[in-house]
Image: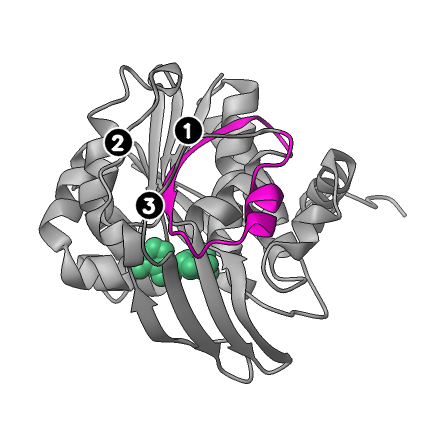
Amino acid sequence: MSLLVVGSVALDAIETPFGKVDRAIGGSATFFSCAARLLHPVQLVAVIGDDYPEEGLARLGRDGVDLAGLERAPGESFFWAGRYSFDFQDRETLETRLGVFAGFEPKVPEAFRDARYVFLGNIDPTLQLQVLDQVRSPTLVACDTMNFWIEGTRESLMRVLERTDVLLLNDAEARQLSGEWNVYKAARWIVRHGPRVVVVKQGEDGALLVEDGRIFAVPAYPLEELFDPTGAGDAFAGGFMGYLAHTDDVTPANLRRAMVYGAAMGSFAVERFSIERFEEISRDHVEARVGEIRALVDCDAGAGS
Ligand code: AMP
């Protein structure tokens, strides 16, 4: 089942307690694709500037990522600079430069328009809407967003939500969007405004799947060393959507399984800078980690011993 993503393809400058990188390969569509392609082929729609390195393109367009919808335009690529606090609990955006995304009009290639699974990665909601207008009859539309867009383009974002089945966001974003401090109340507010399912990512506390009347929680993989959290949310989404597209099953039980794939991919993202970890792992690594996360909450394991 075809899986389409639109989102940022960016160059990032990142500072963590462990070091700094400049012009690292980043962006929501990038992290999403690197994770999802390990489970299912991905069709990518985005734009890069003439400064985007060839080496970056080669790393992005690996097996399983179709770049037919990636435009190159004159100008600067999307640039984001961020800094993490010592305990990784806080992230400060130092700079966001939209570059070529400012004038981007996404054109979904004809061959991508029948996509059954659509991920509207974190990007201007106006562009998310333009992509939705071009896909014919998706089975499931999921969306991600961020403080930048909640603050700056709320009206268009609310229009995207009306056409979205699953919204993925972190707890701070859920609070900001809904105006509710309590995360469960925030999720219920979101469910009243369009999406039938909300996935709230809570960093090292795991993630929640909230549907009308039902809540499911997945723990975060217990990593002892965290290197760079950038892209963890997008990689989570890649695992979640990659699994759904691969199994072509959107029943409540399968959404829960997809959460575990999301948690596994999020944990890989933070183990190295940029997309580096995804260049080392295979489907087998993913399945092994999924098994470990499942075991964390198997309360009957070891019974009788
Ligand atoms: P995450 O850590 O999952 O929130 O994703 C971080 C990635 O999102 C970085 O690689 C950035 O390039 C990208 N990013 C940051 N701000 C924005 C924004 N306002 N719109 C789209 N992408 C962004």
Report the colour scheme.
Answer: one colour
Q: Are marks 3 and 1 in contact (CB under 8 Å)?
A: no
Name the image quarter holding residue 110: top left
- How packed is label 3: few (under 14 Cα within 10 Å), some, or many (20 or more)? some
Report the residue marked by disc 1. Answer: 4
Q: Are marks 1 and 2 in contact (CB under 8 Å)?
A: yes
Name the image quarter holding residue 58: top right
- How packed is label 1: few (under 14 Cα within 10 Å), some, or many (20 or more)? many
Q: Nearer the viewer, residue 166 or 215?
A: 166
Is residue 45 in the magenta section?
A: yes
Amino acid on which disc 2 is placed: Val
Is residue 205 shown above or below 286?
below
- How packed is label 2: few (under 14 Cα within 10 Å), some, or many (20 or more)? many
Q: Of the two numbered discs 1 and 2 on the same chain, state the one appearing first in sequence.
A: 1
Report the residue marked by disc 3. Answer: 73
The boundaries of the magenta stretch are 38-63
Is residue 283 in the magenta section?
A: no
Q: Position of residue 298 (x, y in %)?
A: 70, 44
Mark 1: is the Cβ under 8 angstroms from ligand 1?
no
Which is closer to the viewer, label 3 or label 2? 3
Amino acid on which disc 1 is placed: Leu
Q: Position of residue 167 (x, y in %)?
A: 32, 42
Q: Is residue 124 left or right of residue 21?
A: left
Q: Of the two numbered discs 3 and 2 on the same chain, state the one appearing first in sequence.
A: 3
Q: CA distance from mark 3 to mark 1?
A: 21 Å
Q: CA distance from mark 1 to mark 2?
A: 10 Å
Residue 210 visible in this rendered orientation of the protein: yes
Amino acid on which disc 3 is placed: Ala
Q: Of the two numbered discs 3 and 1 on the same chain, state the one appearing first in sequence.
A: 1
Report the residue marked by disc 2. Answer: 131
